[in-house]
Amino acid sequence: MYVKDLQNILSEFTGGKKGNAINHAKIYVSLNPGNVAEVKKIEVQTNNIIGDRASLRVVLYPMHEVPKLII
């Protein structure tokens, strides 16, 4: 997935007259089936691998807490 894909998905919730509730939604990352953790930090990093076409990457860091169980 690319950042532009994420932007397109989020724009489906924020475009038009759908309101802006998505602006206040927390972001979670799946750690394993049934467990999620809130994202603590997002970084844009430079990729230094020679020959790799992607020069940047976005990294999501989960909070260091007990993951929440989703039922």
Image: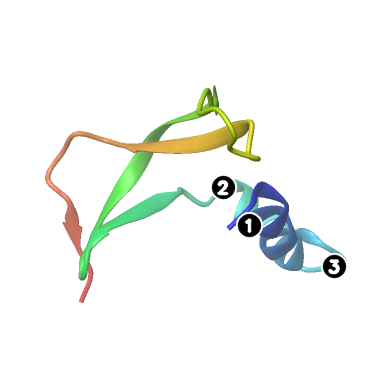
Instruction: Identify the residue at the far right of this view.
Output: 16
Q: Is 4 in front, or is 12?
A: 4
Q: Label 2, on which residue? A: 24
Q: Nearer the viewer, residue 26 or 30?
A: 30
Sort mark 2 into few (<14), some (14-19) or many (20+) by Cα contacts within 10 Å: few
Query: Callout 3 environment at 10 Å: few (<14), some (14 to 19), or many (20+)?
Result: few
- Residue type, numbered disc 2: His
The reply to whether callout 1 and callout 2 are in contact (CB within 8 Å) is yes
Reading the chain from its start, which is encountered first: label 3 or label 2? 3
- Disc sitting over residue 17 in the figure: 3
Residues at circles 3 and 2 in contact by the CB criterion of under 8 Å: no
Report the residue at 64% width, 56% height from top. 6
Gap in angstroms between the C-alphas marked 3 and 1? 11 Å
Element on which disc 3 rests: loop
Which residue is found at the position 63% from the left and 52% from the top?
A: 2
Which disc, if any, is residue 21? 1
Q: Residue at x 68, y 64 (%)?
A: 9
Other-residue count near label 1 (Cα within 10 Å), few / some / many at <14 / 14–19 / ≥20? few
Query: x, y (%) of residue 33?
Result: 21, 70
- Measuring 65% from the left and 40% from the top, which residue is drawn there? 53
| Tag of residue 35 | none
Distance (Cα) linking label 1 and label 2: 6 Å
The quadrant in which the N terminus is found is bottom right
Q: What's the amino acid at mark 3?
A: Lys
Image quarter where the C terminus lies is bottom left
Say if 10 sits above or below 45 in the image: below
